[in-house]
Image (cartoon, rainbow, N blue to C red):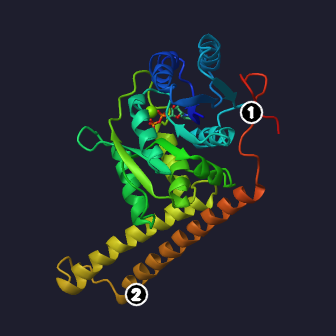
Amino acid sequence: MKKRVSVVVPIYNEEQGIKQFLSEQLFPELKNLSGSYNFEVILVDDGSEDKTAEIVRAEILREKSMKSRMLCFTRNFGKEVALTAGIMAAKDSDAVIMIDSDGQHPVEAIPKMLERWESGAKVVTAMRSRNKTQHKAGSKIFYKTMRLLGDKNIIEGAMDFRLIDHKVAEDYARFSEHMRITRGLIDWLGYPQEYISVELKGRKYGDGTYSFRKLLKLAGDSFVSMTRTPLAIFGYLGLFITVLSLLLGLFILIQQYILGDPLGLDWSGAVAMCVFISFLVGLVLISQAITALYISQIHIEAKNRPLFVIDDDKSEGAIEKK
Ligand code: UDP
Ligand code: MG
């Protein structure tokens, strides 16, 4: 019997390119491979505000030879949640492939992924090939900081273009947290991964809907989610005070004690003491803010809201009713 493979595609405001991606890239590639596999395409419309859902529905209905369905969120829940919904919907498949809908992930790599999976890999991750990449400065800083903060496992260049085995998908569906980075959680599961190197293509239409603001939020979420509480402001204040008093302290040290007061300021020891104390106060404020971030995170998880909401009327194809 042919193995069942689900392809999960998160889509958000892609009206310009989605038709082309499906009809010229994804569907043809899958049809080429359909001699050996039973594919099912799970399109997750992440609350697009433009014509995306209509276009996708038309594509599904037009391409009858391709088994596909669309899950429509009631609003934008974010790519990580869209991926999760797709993976959960694919739980009966033997493998799940996730791929972006903006055409940046090369569909030509799918056969290679399947090959690796057939020879035993539980997780196959596409990596941006080194030579041709123009790393976004933002993502570079993000990865550097993440690693610095202790997440040693995070691998730069790993994309959200992945294949996971049925077992991994099943395990993934057991996570209940809301702030999630899919690839981070898959890494966390600990299955050995195989990497294939692919070329990340440029975006044809629109700009990355992961605007700088969203990227920053993503980065913040993974540190421990930021700015949800006013205390974060005190954290920044603390940072400011710490840096300022550090500079001031260095100035006093060099000016007064090393160079012997060439400016003739004649500051007393009390001044130095004040600066030192402000430095400590800054540190306290910073650590307070970090604690607050942890607590706000706990608050969010404790509410344990449903992760997403599917609009049954808008969706297309077999929808599981819970
Ligand atoms: N996406 C989504 N929800 C969002 C933002 C993006 O489902 O809130 C989808 C988007 O349609 C695309 C994929 O996630 O298929 C990657 O988005 P994008 O190209 O903006 O991110 P980048 O390529 O910069 O990582
Ligand atoms: Mg993209």
* Nearer to me, 199 or 7: 7
Instruction: Tell whether circle 1 marks a residue whose Cβ is less than 8 angstroms from ligand 1.
Output: no
Q: How many numbered discs?
A: 2
- What residue is disc 1 on? 310
Quick check: 18 above or below 180?
above
Quadrant that contains the N terminus: top right
Near mark 1 (Cα within 10 A), the count class, few <14, some 14-19 or many ≥20, is many
Q: Which mark is nearer the camera, 1 or 2?
A: 1
SS under mark 2: helix
Quick check: 299 above or below 250?
above
* Nearer to me, 167 or 15: 167
Viewer can see residue 11:
no
> Residue 288: x and y, percent?
58, 71
> Residue 227: x and y, percent?
58, 54
Q: Say which label, 1 or 2, has the lower sequence index.
A: 2
- What residue is disc 2 on? 270
Quadrant that contains the C terminus: top right
Q: Amino acid at mark 1?
A: Ile
Viewer can see residue 172:
yes
Q: Residue furthest bottom?
A: 269
Q: Amino acid at mark 2?
A: Ala
Ligand 2: which quarter? top left
Q: Marks 1 and 2, Cα distance to the nearest angstrom?
A: 64 Å
- Judge from the rendering whether residue 136 lies leftward or rightward of residue 310; answer left or right: left
> Residue 199: x and y, percent?
32, 35
SS under mark 1: loop
